[in-house]
Image (spheres, rainbow, N blue to C red):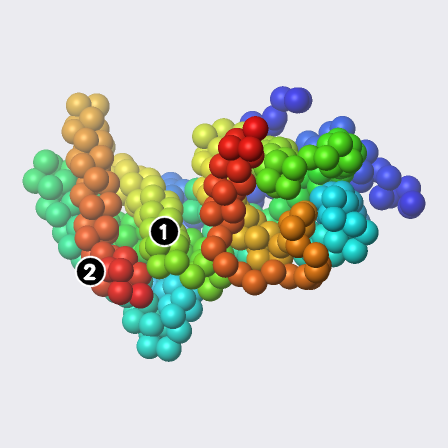
Amino acid sequence: MSPALTQSIEQLLRSPDNVVQSLKSKDEQVGAYRASLLLIVTGTACFGAVLGTSHGPLQSLYSAIKLPAAVLLTLLLTTPAFTAIAAALRRPLTAANATLLVLAAAARGALVLLALSPVVWLAMRHGLQYHRGIMTAVLCYTLADMYALRMILRGVGNDWRGRFVVLFFAAALIPAGAQSTWMLRPFVGRPSQHTLPFLRNIDGSFTDSVTRSLDSSVRFE
Amino acid sequence: MADSTIEPVLSVPEQPKNQNSSALDLGSPAFLVERALVGLGLSIFFGLALGMHRGGLSLITHALAIPGGLLLTTCVSIPSLYIVLSMLGAPLRLGLLLASVSTALHTAGRVLAGFAPIAALLVVTIREPIALALVAKLGLEIAGCLSLYRLMSAVREANALSGTIPGSAQTKYGLVLCGFVVLALNLGQMAFSTLLPALRGAS
């Protein structure tokens, strides 16, 4: 691992303020792009692989490919909205800075997912039920999103304007992220399913699934 | 968790054309019209995204309904604001109000265009008609709130630029502006419920 990458990871973990400051420097922007993308792919791929463990190595492989794709698709779709919201609330960002900030925040979120991976893996090994597995994944994504949004708040300024930017951005990010992930499911794999499809047909939506899983995880107590 | 910074770190300061103003971007009438038209033009992308739920003619009807709704809401509500503020003795000049409207329309269009990719993803992949209505409402409400915020900031600054305002009058104008926000949101809801097939349940 290169020293620059190690430094980027250290900064994302320990001092996100420094990361945000460093994004202003043109020299550090390329390094930040690379480090953020690498962390997003690595962190989400590991978490995806862990989610698939309950259904064997092939499902793990599929999930490790699909989860980074879902996250990158979400970032691609939501960055224009973020730029527009920030400009509307008089916190304009250049396109490059907005993209970098969103990528760095997502990288921090991916690191949170990476940290949670062993916990989820352990729970899966101890026979975490399918619906509970989905609820656990949703909770992990929520936690990772919170850390990512806090970093965005540092970039746009932690006053009422900045908080509103983050609030409106969250209103765009949450449905887009949930639906992108939903489109690329399965990540966990149903226990009753004997074949492993790479993608499942689109029926219903993410909210239907969470409601169903929440209902099932409570009912089968 | 560590304390967050208060100052915006990455945001670049806006560059107003008028040194006395930050929210109000003054320019020639042609510039103001152009900016409003750019806003309306950008809002078409959100309409197109909503139209993807059904495709075909729906693309055109939704694409036209979004700028149409914005224009209708503006045309119906802004004269009331100008009349009431003028009758209450506010020093706001018409040219400055039009500059504020131009800023607000540009903001609405830009936000709607920013939401267009997300809207397209959601309406194409969720087949239930209620999803289309929810996506349309979410996008329009966020764009409405942000453009009204820009409009209010600009009107307040335009008012201040037009003349000195005593303290008691400021409260009065503030109340009028609050009333205007409620009126504009309701008018917007009515206009889009009438014009936008997604909100009429006839997607």
Residue in the foreground of this view, choosing between B57 and B103: B57
> Residue at image x 46%, y 64%?
B124
Kindly state the secondary structure of the residue where label 2 is placed: helix
Mark 2 or mark 1, whichever is nearer to me = 1
In the picture, the disc for residue A177 is none
Tell me where residue B53 appears, x and y as whole percent. Answer: 40, 66
Subunit under mark 1: B
* Left or right of residue B134: residue A158: right
Rendered position, B9 above or below B42: above
**Position above or below: A197 against A12:** below
What amino acid is labelled 1 in the image? Leu
Residue under mark 2: which chain is it in?
B
> Would you say B36 lies left or right of A83 here?
left
Looking at the image, which residue is at 15% across and 55% down?
B76
Q: Would you call the spot at circle 1 few (<14 residues within 10 Å), some (14-19), or many (20 or more)?
A: some
Provide the secondary structure element on which disc 1 rests: helix
Residue A174 can be seen in this image: yes
Nearer to me, A137 or B26:
A137
Do tags 2 and 1 sit on the same chain? yes
Residue positioned most to the left: B87
Picture coordinates of residue B201, whole percent (x, y): 26, 60
How far across and down, in percent of the image, does residue A46 sit?
78, 45
Decide which of tag 2 and tag 1 comes sooner along the chain.
Answer: 1
Residue at the spot of label 1: B134
Does residue B149 sit above or below B66 in this rendering? Answer: above
Which residue is at a point 18% across and 36% down the rendered structure image?
B179
Query: Which residue position is annotated with label 2?
Result: B194
Q: Quadrant of the N terminus of chain B?
A: top right
On the image, the x and y values in percent for residue B74 come to: 22, 55
Q: What residue type is labelled 2?
A: Thr
| Alpha carbon separation for disc pair 2 and 1 | 16 Å
